[in-house]
Image: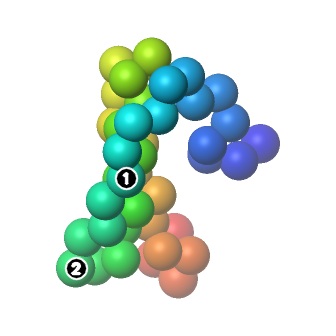
Amino acid sequence: MTPLTGLDSPRGVAVDAQGNLYVVDTGNNRVLRLRPRDQA
C-alpha cells in the first residue's frame, strides 16, 4: 500500500527545504507528509 492510496479530493502539494512532500487531502481532512526515502 502506498502512502497516497485513499486520497479523497487532493488539492495541493508542497515541498520543504528538507525534501519532505506535503499533500493536502481535503476529502479526508488531513495533510500527508512523505519523507525522502533516505530519511524513512
Residue 32 locus on image (x, y percent): 41, 43
The amino acid marked with disc number 1 is Val
Furthest-right residue in view? 1
Quadrant in the picture for residue 16: bottom left
Q: Residue at x 46, y 58 (%)?
A: 34
> Measured along the vertical axis of the image, is residue 15 above or below residue 27?
below
Task: Determine which of the numbered discs, if any, sits on residue 17 in the image.
Answer: 2
How packed mark 1 is, by other alpha carbons closer than 10 Å (few <14, some 14-19, many 20 or more), is: few
The amino acid marked with disc number 2 is Ala
> Measured along the vertical axis of the image, is residue 2 above or below residue 21?
above
Task: Determine which of the numbered discs, if any, sits on residue 27 in the image.
Answer: none
Q: How many discs mark residues in the rendered view?
A: 2
Q: Residue at x 53, y 82 (%)?
A: 38
Q: Which type of secondary structure does the marked residue at label 2 adopt?
A: loop
Residue 24 locus on image (x, y percent): 36, 38
Q: Nearer the viewer, residue 10 or 21?
A: 10
> Measured along the vertical axis of the image, is residue 40 above or below residue 22?
below
> Measured along the vertical axis of the image, is residue 10 above or below residue 23?
above
Q: Which residue is mark 1?
A: 13
Mark 1 vs 2: CB contact within 8 A: no
Disc 1 to disc 2, how far (Cα)?
Answer: 14 Å
Apparent side of residue 20 relative to residue 5 in the rendered image (left or right):
left
How packed mark 2 is, by other alpha carbons closer than 10 Å (few <14, some 14-19, many 20 or more), is: few
Q: Which type of secondary structure does the marked residue at label 1 adopt?
A: strand
